[in-house]
């Protein structure tokens, strides 16, 4: 198969470098995310995972390199028309009810509000229907997270960027969300998620990226990651990876 037969990547980073002041955060990061991938982005605290996502979404500038999203420069608004994003610290407008928030997000996504579909999505995420009538300021962290994820799912986008999507969820909620993410992949969507849980990455992701010292220290399948470092699980492989790339 020649290059012309290969599908175009959903996301492409080419030698992207970012500094905060004089401190390098990203160092010539290069990667491709292909259609249909469920990719997990991992790294130690402060590795630059959220900064990398902010660069992708054009929330911050970077010093050098290039990012393409759906074949377009990432700075063009059209590149994000098929993208849904859930930040790690998701805080919806406190004065809205759950229904008002979901209706507002449906309007942004240019979809009609369909309460039956909303309730079905809430059920998939183990989110109570009474959230629709409650002010979002009264919701727990886990309920708020699931509300944001529901809005992403209801947007019917092709590409999902989820920063710690299972943060604050109880075990039942984590199971439901992981099942839903696997369903999205099976339906042909592309997902990029960060996670502090390597067990979650191993369970649901078919591709993983390890960001360390501002560089991609590994990109490939979780099984390949274990094999490369002669480890029986991702935790052991991760420790070996970051120790071998120290400095």
Image (spheres, rainbow, N blue to C red):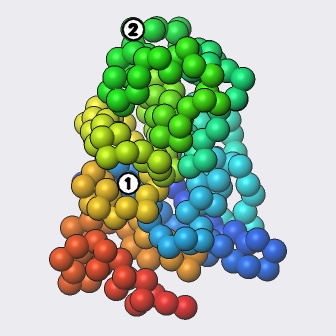
Q: Residue at x 34, y 85 (%)?
A: 240
How many numbered dots are placed on residues in this image?
2
The answer to which image quadrant residue 14 occupies is bottom right
Task: Describe residue 40's horizontal placement relative to residue 66 as left or right.
Answer: left
- Residue at 68% across, 40% down: 76
Q: In the rendered image, which residue does mark 1 sit on?
A: 39
Labels 1 and 2: the sequence-earlier one: 1
Q: State the image coordinates of residue 235 (x, y, percent, origin top left).
A: 31, 74
Rate crowding at label 1 as few (under 14), some (14 to 19) or many (20 or more) other CA atoms within 10 Å.
many
Q: CA distance from mark 1 to mark 2?
A: 30 Å
User: Could you say which disc has been placed on residue 116 in the image?
Assistant: 2
Residue 187, image x and y in percent?
29, 32
Query: Residue 120's spot in the image, x, y percent?
Result: 35, 17
Q: Nearer the viewer, residue 65 or 195?
A: 195
Placement of the C terminus among the 4 image quadrants: bottom right
Q: Residue at x 44, y 77 (%)?
A: 217
Q: Secondary structure at mark 2?
A: helix
Q: Secondary structure at mark 1?
A: strand
Q: Is residue 186 left or right of residue 39?
A: left
The dot on residue 192 is none
In the rendered view, would you say 127 is above or below 62? above
Q: Which quadrant of the structure image shows residue 208? A: bottom left
Q: Quadrant of residue 110?
A: top right
Front position in the image: 196 or 245: 196
């Amino acid at each position: 198969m020649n290059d012309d037969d290969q599908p175009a990547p959903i996301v492409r980073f080419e030698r992207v470098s970012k500094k905060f002041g004089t401190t390098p955060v990203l160092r010539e990061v290069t990667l491709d995310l292909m259609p249909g991938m469920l990719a997990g982005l991992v790294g130690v605290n402060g590795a630059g995972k959220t900064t990398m996502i902010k660069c992708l979404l054009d929330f911050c500038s970077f010093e050098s390199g290039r990012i393409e999203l759906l074949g377009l420069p990432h700075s063009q608004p059209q590149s994000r028309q098929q993208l849904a994003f859930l930040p790690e610290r998701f805080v919806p407008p406190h004065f809205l009810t759950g229904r008002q928030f979901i209706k507002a997000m449906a309007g942004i996504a240019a979809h009609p509000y369909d309460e039956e579909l909303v309730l079905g999505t809430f059920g998939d995420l183990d989110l109570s229907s009474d959230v629709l009538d409650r002010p979002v300021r009264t919701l727990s962290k886990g309920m708020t997270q699931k509300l944001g994820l529901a809005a992403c799912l209801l947007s019917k986008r092709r590409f999902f960027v989820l920063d710690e999507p299972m943060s604050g969820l109880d075990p039942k909620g984590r199971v439901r969300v992981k099942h839903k993410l696997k369903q999205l992949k099976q339906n042909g969507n592309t997902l990029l998620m960060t996670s502090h849980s390597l067990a979650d990455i191993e369970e649901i992701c078919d591709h993983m990226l390890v960001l360390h010292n501002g560089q991609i220290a590994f990109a490939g399948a979780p099984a390949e990651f274990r094999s490369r470092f002669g480890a029986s699980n991702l935790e052991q492989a991760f420790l070996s990876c970051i120790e071998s790339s120290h400095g």
